[in-house]
Image (spheres, grey):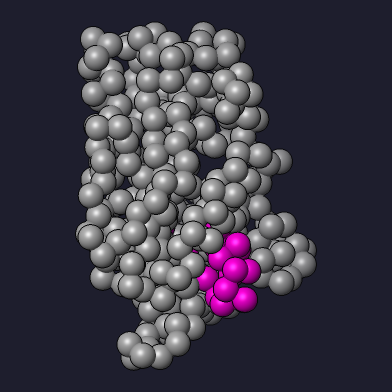
C-alpha cells in the first residue's frame, strides 16, 4: 500500500483522540474499519505507530517520529488549501494549541459555533511561536499557557483572555514509596531524578526551577525529553518523577498526585487576532474554551478529587 495524505490524517486523528473509537466517530467510519486501516498503515511503514491498551492508544517512539513529520506535512498542505486573498471568506479555522486534552473538544465546539466550518489543529511546544502565528494571522486562534512570574506579553494586535488556572501535579511510579498518599510534598522529591521538557519559551520549566529553589534544592533533571511515551516509561519504571498537568493520564504503573500546598500553577489563555475573522466571536469562543477545559477534567479522577477537596 502506498501512503497518502488520507493515511496521515488517520494517524493524526488517532493520536489526537487517544482512542480508536473516538477517532472512528470523528472520521465517520466504524471502529473495525479504522483498526484494519491502521494495521495496513503500520504494515506499510514497517513498524507499529501506536501501542494499544485498555484505556486507549499512545504513540510508540517510532510513532512520535511519524506523527511529528505527518503534522508538518498536513499543516503545510492545509495552509495551501486554506490560502485565499484577503477579502475572500475564510473557509476554515486554524486552531493552534500547546499540548492539552481540551484542544480536540474545543475544535469540535468551534466547528459547531461556526455552522460546520472545518477546524484544523496544530500543536506546538513553543508558546511564543503560537502567539507569533496568531499575530501574523497564520493561525486564527490558539490555546497557550503561561505561569506566575512569567506573564506572556503578546503583540497588541492579539486579544488574550484567561480560560482556566490549574495546579501542577507530579507523576511517579506506582511502586514509589510516596505513591500511596493523597499528595506529595515537593521537598520529598529533592533527591529524585526528574524528567523535564525543553523550555517552552514562556516560563516552563523555569517556574518549576524557581519554586524548587525557594524550597532549597535544584531538581536533578537527568532526562530532558520531548517524547511523551518515553517519559511515561521512565516514570512507570521508577527511573524518574515528572511534573505534569493534572489531566495527565494515570494508568498501569503510574500515579498522578497533587503537590502539597499547590506551589506551582499554569494559566491557559485563548488568543486571537483583534482584527481577524474570528474577532466577532471572541466572547463565544472563550466560553467554548472554558467548557472544553471543564470537559477535559472529566477523565482525570485525581484532578476531580483535588477540585472537590478545595471546593473548586
Q: Position of residue 32 (x, y in %)?
A: 77, 63
Note whether residue 106 is visible.
yes
Quarter assignment of residue 11: bottom right
Residue occupying image coordinates x 77% and y 67%: 30
193 lies left or right of 238: left
177 lies left or right of 298: left
Is residue 10 one of those drawn in magenta?
Answer: no
Q: Position of residue 66 (x, y in %)?
A: 44, 61
Q: Position of residue 84 (x, y in %)?
A: 37, 89
Which one is nearer the viewer's eye here, 214 or 50? Answer: 214
245 lies left or right of 40: left
Q: Quadrant of the C terminus?
A: top right
Residue occupying image coordinates x 53% and y 21%: 257
Note whether residue 296 is visible.
no
Is residue 114 one of those drawn in magenta?
Answer: yes
Q: Does residue 133 sit above or below 182 in this rendering?
A: below
Q: Quadrant of the N terminus?
A: bottom right
User: What segment carries the magenta color?
Assistant: 106-124
Residue occupying image coordinates x 52% and y 71%: 119
Q: Position of residue 254 (x, y in %)?
A: 56, 26
Amino acid at each position: 500500500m502506498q501512503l497518502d495524505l488520507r493515511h496521515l490524517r488517520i494517524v493524526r486523528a488517532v493520536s489526537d483522540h487517544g482512542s480508536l473509537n473516538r477517532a472512528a466517530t470523528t472520521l465517520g467510519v466504524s471502529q473495525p474499519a479504522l483498526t484494519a486501516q491502521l494495521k495496513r498503515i503500520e504494515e506499510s511503514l514497517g513498524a507499529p505507530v501506536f501501542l494499544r491498551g485498555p484505556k486507549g492508544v499512545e504513540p510508540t517512539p517510532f510513532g512520535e517520529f511519524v506523527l511529528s513529520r505527518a503534522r508538518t506535512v498536513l499543516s503545510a498542505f492545509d495552509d495551501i488549501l486554506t490560502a485565499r486573498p484577503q477579502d475572500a471568506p475564510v473557509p476554515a479555522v486554524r486552531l493552534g494549541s500547546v499540548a492539552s486534552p481540551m484542544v480536540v473538544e474545543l475544535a469540535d465546539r468551534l466547528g459547531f459555533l461556526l455552522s460546520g466550518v472545518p477546524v484544523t489543529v496544530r500543536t506546538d511546544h513553543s508558546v511564543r511561536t503560537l502567539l507569533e502565528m496568531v499575530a501574523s494571522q497564520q493561525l486564527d486562534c490558539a490555546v497557550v499557557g503561561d505561569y506566575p512570574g512569567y506573564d506572556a506579553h503578546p503583540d497588541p494586535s492579539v486579544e488574550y483572555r484567561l480560560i482556566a488556572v490549574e495546579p501542577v501535579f507530579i507523576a511517579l511510579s506506582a511502586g514509589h514509596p510516596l505513591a500511596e498518599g493523597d499528595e506529595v510534598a515537593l521537598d520529598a522529591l529533592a533527591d529524585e531524578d526528574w524528567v523535564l521538557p525543553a523550555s517552552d519559551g514562556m516560563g516552563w520549566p523555569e517556574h518549576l526551577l524557581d519554586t524548587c529553589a525557594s524550597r532549597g534544592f535544584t531538581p536533578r533533571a537527568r532526562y530532558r525529553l520531548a517524547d511523551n511515551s518515553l517519559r511515561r516509561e521512565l516514570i512507570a519504571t521508577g527511573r524518574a518523577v515528572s511534573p505534569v498537568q493534572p489531566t495527565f493520564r494515570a494508568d498501569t504503573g503510574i500515579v498522578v498526585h497533587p503537590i502539597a500546598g499547590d506551589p506551582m500553577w499554569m494559566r491557559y489563555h485563548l488568543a486571537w487576532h483583534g482584527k481577524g475573522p474570528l474577532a466577532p466571536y471572541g466572547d463565544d469562543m472563550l466560553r467554548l474554551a472554558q467548557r472544553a477545559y471543564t470537559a477535559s477534567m472529566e477523565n482525570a479522577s485525581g484532578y476531580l478529587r483535588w477540585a472537590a477537596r478545595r471546593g473548586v
